[in-house]
Amino acid sequence: MTATTPTTTPTTTLADRALIRLSGDDVAGFLQGLVTNAVGPVSETTPIWAGLLTAQGKALFDFLVWRDGEDYLLDCEAEQAEALIQRLRLYRLRRQIEIERDDSLSVHWSPDAADKPVDPRLPDLGHRWLSPETGGDASDGWRAHRLSLGVTEGVAELGSDKTLWLECNAGELNGVDFQKGCYVGQENTARMHYRNKINRRLVVVPLDRADEKRQRIAYPELGLSVEHRRVEDYEEDDRPGWLAEAIDK
């Protein structure tokens, strides 16, 4: 009898992510007037990264936006899904739009799934896709990979109503369209951009160089700290290549 090697399903599911489905009358127009990025280019295979801000331009939620036929899907933190749904419903007013969590799909990630969509923030982040399939949880691997590249996300790192969207490095990570029309927080975001007034940014630093006064969250298991620092306080080694040019301006 010939021995067979058992096949294993790759661990790709991001169990700490959830999907919110928006369907109904002119969902594209609804989102276009709310979020920081233009939704026109979004498709089933071309997501965007965007934020929902306060009127002052501070991050409340960040998420990826996908298309599913006429519907749109928000790929967000599972722990923040209900809060995001409630916030979106406040803006819905009398529009005939349904906003509900969709548990029929899961978010997946792999650093090297070449046949899947590339993360819109940074190609080095790897590949991301939506599928009904589930498997082992890849959340820890995703977090380690993302932070190794200096990319922050989620309420624990960005804060809620604490950090201006451009201080979250949204300009460098394709999280804002400066040519689109109005959205919540647009005025202050545009002013910062055109006046080049980004004095503080989120940065990922080694834990042994952490400054607790500036720290948002520590990851002892990774030896890393996410901090909100003034640009002049960055160490040379703390600047990922994708951010260095912006800081040196």
Image (cartoon, rainbow, N blue to C red):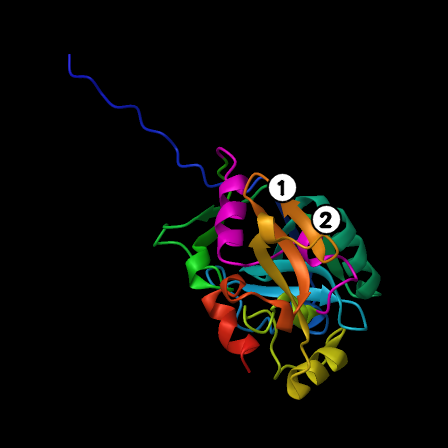
Q: Nearer the viewer, residue 51 or 150?
A: 150
Give residue 218's position: percent from left, percent from top: 65, 46
Assess whether residue 159 is covered by the magenta stretch.
yes
Identify which amino acid the numbered label 1 is placed on: Asp
Q: Secondary structure at mark 1?
A: loop
The extreme bottom residue here reads: 195
Residue where numbered disc 2 is placed: 80
Q: Nearer the viewer, residue 215 or 29?
A: 215
Q: Is residue 116 highlighted in magenta?
A: no
On residue 103, which mark appears?
1
Q: CA distance from mark 2 to mark 1?
A: 15 Å
State which quarter of the image contains the C terminus.
bottom right
Q: Position of residue 95 (x, y in %)?
A: 79, 66
In the image, the segment drawn in magenta is 135-164
Mark 1 nearby-residue class (10 Å; few <14, some 14–19, many ≥20): few
Q: Quadrant of residue 215?
A: bottom right
Q: Is residue 150 left or right of residue 22?
A: left
For the image, the number of numbered tags is 2
Q: Amino acid at mark 2?
A: Gln
Q: Earlier in the sequence, mark 2 or mark 1?
A: 2
Residue placed most toward the observer, 167 or 154? 167
Q: Residue at x 67, y 54 (%)?
A: 157
Position of residue 2 relative to residue 109, above or below, is: above
68 or 142, nearer to the observer: 142
Identify the residue at image location x=55%, y=70%.
174
Labelled pair 2, 1 in contact (Cβ < 8 Å): no
Q: Is residue 116 above or below residue 137?
A: below
Where's residue 96, x and y in %? 76, 62
What is the secondary structure assignment of the residue under circle 2? helix
Among all residues in the image, which is located at the extreme left? Answer: 1
